[in-house]
Amino acid sequence: MFYRILISVLLVSLSVSAYARNPGDPIWGVYASGIGEVINPSIDPCNITYKVAAMDNKRILKNIAVGTMVPIAEGLTWSEAGVVSRWSGQYFEDQPDGVFKTRPCRAETTLRTPPPIVRRNRPNAGGLGGGKNNPSNIGHDIIGNHKLAFTCTSGCSGVWRHTMTVSSMDKQGNFSGTGYYDGDRGYTWTVKGKAIGNRVKFKMVYTGKNKGYTSTNSGNIRPDGTMDGTGFSSTGQKHTWTSQ
């Protein structure tokens, strides 16, 4: 009898360990819930709550499919997800999550600085998390200033440093902004692009000196928010690029 009990305990232990999740693995997500209500732009922000769960949780995926939950951030460790969840839930769910809930639900809310966590979202996955108005289509919020370094590889030479300011970005990952060449601010340009998951692409069109010259770029967004990639110009030059 003792051995039967021991074997049963061992089998249960093995079963549990086989399905155990490592809190340090980037498999966790933070999800906004409408508590049974379909989440849409007109929902009362006070009715939105937040839950931390594994990204492959079947119940979460089912709720996403029917629209009662949306991903706020995915690809996080358990600790990172906890920080994002606690931040989003400050003051009884008052704090905007920066992805879907864009305004607090109480006018008297004191807005706080978001936690220093890179909020990574999975790329568009069709019926589970995809769709025109689903924030899971985007990855990183790249609004702000970026120091770009373009290193010529063909048709030119040297390193050319620019400053890019992304001023707007929608829920589909489309962004726009302006920039200039650090060595001569007379070389100004506009930029339009798209960031999905950990991929980014953008096109710069000069508006000041050398008006009409373009630079088309694509690359990767690293977990820390910096970027790198390759590109080419309208005159056939080729380059690599990095951002800080």
Image: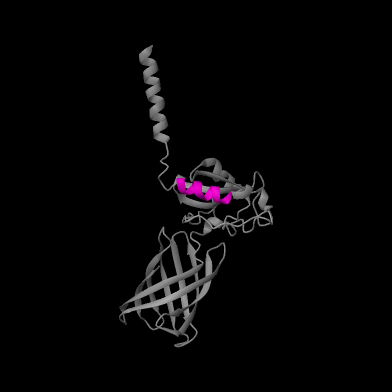
Residue 171: give x, y in percent of width and height.
57, 62
Which of 42 and 77 lies nearest the eye of the viewer?
77
Left or right, 221 with respect to 108, comes to left
Report the residue that reaches farthest toward the top: 1
Q: Is residue 155 left or right of residue 142?
A: left
Q: Is residue 4 visible?
A: yes
Residue at 44% across, 47% down? 77
Is residue 67 visible to the viewer in this orientation of the structure?
Answer: no
Residue 105 colored magenta? no
Specify whether 34 is left or right of 232: right
Residue in the foreground of this view, choosing between 194 and 208: 208
Give the image location of residue 205, x and y in percent.
Answer: 48, 80
> Between 52 and 195, which is closer to the camera in this rendering?
52
Q: Quadrant of the C terminus?
A: bottom left
Residue 102 image point, x, y percent: 62, 59
> Magenta span: helix, strand or loop, mainly?
helix
* Residue span colored magenta: 79-89
Residue located at (41% from left, 82% from top) = 234
Residue 206 horizontal/vertical position (percent): 47, 83
60 in relation to 171, above or below: above
Q: Quadrant of residue 36?
A: top right
